[in-house]
Amino acid sequence: MIHPPILLRTISDLRANTASWHSEGLTVGMIPTMGALHDGHLALVTEARRRVDRIVATIFVNPAQFAPTEDFGAYPRTEASDVEMLAALGVEAVFAPAAREMYPEGHATTISVAGPALGLETDFRPHFFTGVATVVGKLLIGGFPDIAMFGEKDYQQLLVVRQMVADLHLPTEIVGLPTVREADGLALSSRNAYLSAEERRTAARLPAVLQQTATAIRSGTDAAEACATGRAALEAAGFRPDYLELRNSETLAAPIPCSSEPLRLLVAAWLGKTRLIDNIAV
Ligand code: PAF
C-alpha cells in the first residue's frame, strides 16, 4: 500500500519533522528539486533510499535563481503528479513552501559563493549561484538532513553547493549522482519539455559533440582547439553555444597544461528558446 508523504509548507514544520526523526535515531536524506520531476530526480530518491531511513523531497521553483528575462513564469509546475511519483517511491515527506515562506517580506540576506561559482554559468547567468546557494542554504538549515542529493547534470551547481556547505560548516554530506540520460544520450532535464519535436531530435547532438570533444582531448588534441571544433559542430547543428570548456573537475579552475589533474568538459548551448547544459568527465 502506498502512503502519501506528509506535505510540509513551512520551515518550522520541516524542522519539527526532521527533528522528530532524528530524535528517534533515524537518518534523514533531503532531495532539493524545483519539481517537474523526471527519472533523474527519481534516481536521487532511489539512492537516498539505500542510504538513509527517511527522505524529504523539496519542491520549490526558486525565484532568486531566475533573472527577470528567464523562464520563471513558464517553468513547469506539476506538484500533484510530483507528489504521486514521490509517494510511489515511498518518500516520507515533501516540503513545498510558498515563495513568501522562503523569502518573507523584508528578507535581506543572501549567500554568495566564489571558487567553483566563478566563470561558466556565472558568465551568462550572474545571479544564478547566489540564488541557488541561498535557497539550498535555507533548505539545509531548515531541515538539517544527514545527506542531500544532487545530480551531476548541474555539475557546477554540485560543486558550488559542496563549497557552501563546507564553508558554512553545515552538518550535511552532499552526494552527487551521475547524470541520467535518454537512449540517444540527451541528459534528462525538466527544461527538455520546452523542445519542439525537431529540436528534440537535434538536442542529441549536444552529448554527441561533448563525447567527440572529450575523445579528441583524451587522444592528445589541444583542449582549446578541440573545444573550438566542438563549438563549431554545435553551431553547424543549429545551437548557439554559451560555452564549451575544459576545467579541473574538483575546482573548475582552468586546467594546467601537461598536468595529470582530473578534468571535466562542460557545455551550455541554446537550441531555439531552450538553454541546455551538460558535462562529462574527460
Ligand atoms: O537543481 C535544481 O533543481 C535547483 O537549482 C535546486 C538545487 C533545487 C535549487 O533551487
Image (cartoon, rainbow, N blue to C red):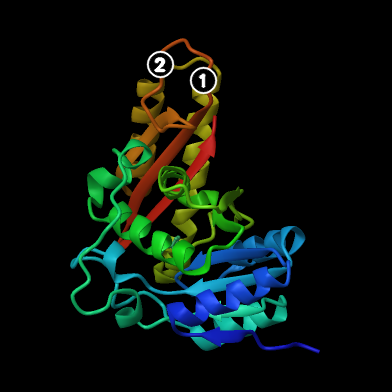
For the question of whether residue 97 can be seen, the reply is yes
**What residue is drawn where x is 66% and y is 68%?**
22
Kindly identify which numbered label has been placed on residue 261.
1
- Residue sitting nearer the eye, 117 or 101: 101
**What residue is drawn where x is 51% and y is 20%?**
261
Kindly identify which numbered label has been placed on residue 104.
none
Label 2: element kind: loop
User: Which residue appears farthest toward the front when viewing the image?
Assistant: 23
State the image coordinates of residue 171 (x, y, percent, origin top left). Answer: 54, 52
Going by the image, does 199 lie left or right of 45? Answer: left
- Residue sitting nearer the eye, 255 or 101: 101
State the image coordinates of residue 59 (x, y, percent, origin top left). Answer: 48, 75
**What residue is drawn where x is 41% and y is 21%?**
255
Label 1: element kind: loop
Q: Is residue 220 above or below residue 209?
A: above
For the question of whether residue 192 can be seen, the reply is no
| Mark 1 or mark 2, earlier in chain | 2
Q: Do the residues under discs 1 and 2 have CB atoms within 8 angstroms? A: yes
Ligand 1 - quadrant of the structure image: bottom left
Q: Which residue is mark 2?
A: 256
Quarter in which the C terminus is drawn: top right
